[in-house]
Image: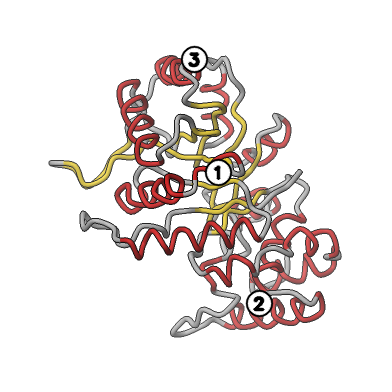
Amino acid sequence: MQELIYGCMGLGGTWSDEPHGSDHVEEAAAAIDAALDAGITLFDHADIYRNGKSEAVFGEVLAARPELRGRIRLQTKCGIRLSEPGMPGYYDLSRDAILERVNASLKRLRTDYVDVLLLHRPDPLADPAEVAGAVGHLMAEGKVRQLGVSNMSAAQIEVLQDQLETPVVANQLEMSLLKRAWLESHVLVNHAEHLDYSFPHGTVEYCIRNGITLQAYGSLARGLYTGAEPESPSSAETATAELVARLAADYGTSGEAVLLGWLMKHPAGIAPVIGTINPGRILACRDAGRVAQAMTRTEWYQLWVAARGSNIP
């Protein structure tokens, strides 16, 4: 069954070492409640979000309202190091880093386990057997229940899966009406235009074949088609926003629900990740499943063509 996921990257204040305040905890609580009201039960984190403050404010909400833990599922990520001495950032999926980062996330989230751990980015120095060993250790301790990945190709998942004793259950990728490389890289095969897309061909199909849920981050296209006002909008952006608004009116819903419904209409069973911290905008997403079921093939293609700014070859 498809679902919406709440992405917690916006919680916790600024991307700095400045500590979070009570207002940030209240903001997190309001976002969590709005997500629950919208039918969302899976909450997506990463150890680096807001330098750990996204997990920390969420953990404070859970500490104040412990009954919430039984109503939700938590997902977090590890594998990226930011702002460390001598390096602006790099990837680290070594055994020690995985164990250290997951334990730190659990402490910030104030929980004994996460339902899903995602490996945040491919690490060229990662040894798949070492990664599998770390994951197996965390699962044996009851700290991680399922494993997923993020930003990985089919080949990278396959090599990792060969060493794992647990199935990879999710792959989180940037997917939206704005970011369409996941769709166009293979639809445009045998057209010169497909060379403009770096998305690894076959990844979507691999996930479908192996029961790996595709989680779509950036799914609301940063508000481009539903209220954000770029300084110099292109004709395609303007036309797409107008079409989204028209379809939203036809369906008696929001533009956000139309954008998410477009993603969820795809037979891959895409689960959109919603990143806004605005409670009203979170609630505006709740009709996405209904829109996905009602949207016609013609409407789906009309949105794609409008976003491309040209016909499909």
- Would residue 195 be seen by someone viewing this image from the given angle? no
Mark 3 Cα within 10 Å, few/some/many (few <14, many 20+)? Answer: few
Residue picked out by circle 2: 240
Q: Where 139 sits versus 29, above or below?
A: above
Q: In which quarter of the image is residue 165?
A: top right
Mark 1 Cα within 10 Å, few/some/many (few <14, many 20+)? Answer: few
Query: Where does the image place residue 30, in percent across and percent down from the top left?
Result: 50, 63
> Colour scheme used in the picture?
secondary structure
Q: Of the two numbered discs 1 and 3 on the same chain, state the one appearing first in sequence.
A: 1
Label 2 with label 3: CB-CB less than 8 Å: no
Query: Where does the image place residue 75, in percent across and percent down from the top left?
Result: 51, 40
Residue picked out by circle 3: 140
Q: Which residue lies furthest to the left in this view?
A: 86
- Would residue 255 be seen by someone viewing this image from the given angle? yes
Closer to the observer: label 1 or label 3? 1
Query: Where does the image place residue 64, in percent across and percent down from the top left?
Result: 43, 49
CA separation, marks 1 and 2?
42 Å
Identified at 39% across, 19% down, the residue is 127
Asked which secondary structure carries label 3, the reply is helix
Q: Of the two numbered discs 2 and 3 on the same chain, state the one appearing first in sequence.
A: 3
Closer to the observer: label 2 or label 3? 3
Q: Indicate the quadrant containing the C terminus: top left, top right, bottom left or bottom right.
A: bottom right
Residue 243 or residue 132, whichever sits in front: 132
Residue 191 or residue 10, whichever sits in front: 10
Q: Indicate the quadrant containing the N terminus: top left, top right, bottom left or bottom right.
A: top right
CA separation, marks 2 and 3?
49 Å
Instruction: Inspect the image, locate mark 1, and give the three-letter code of the amino acid beneath it.
Output: Glu
Identified at 44% across, 51% down, the residue is 61
| Circle number at residue 67 | 1
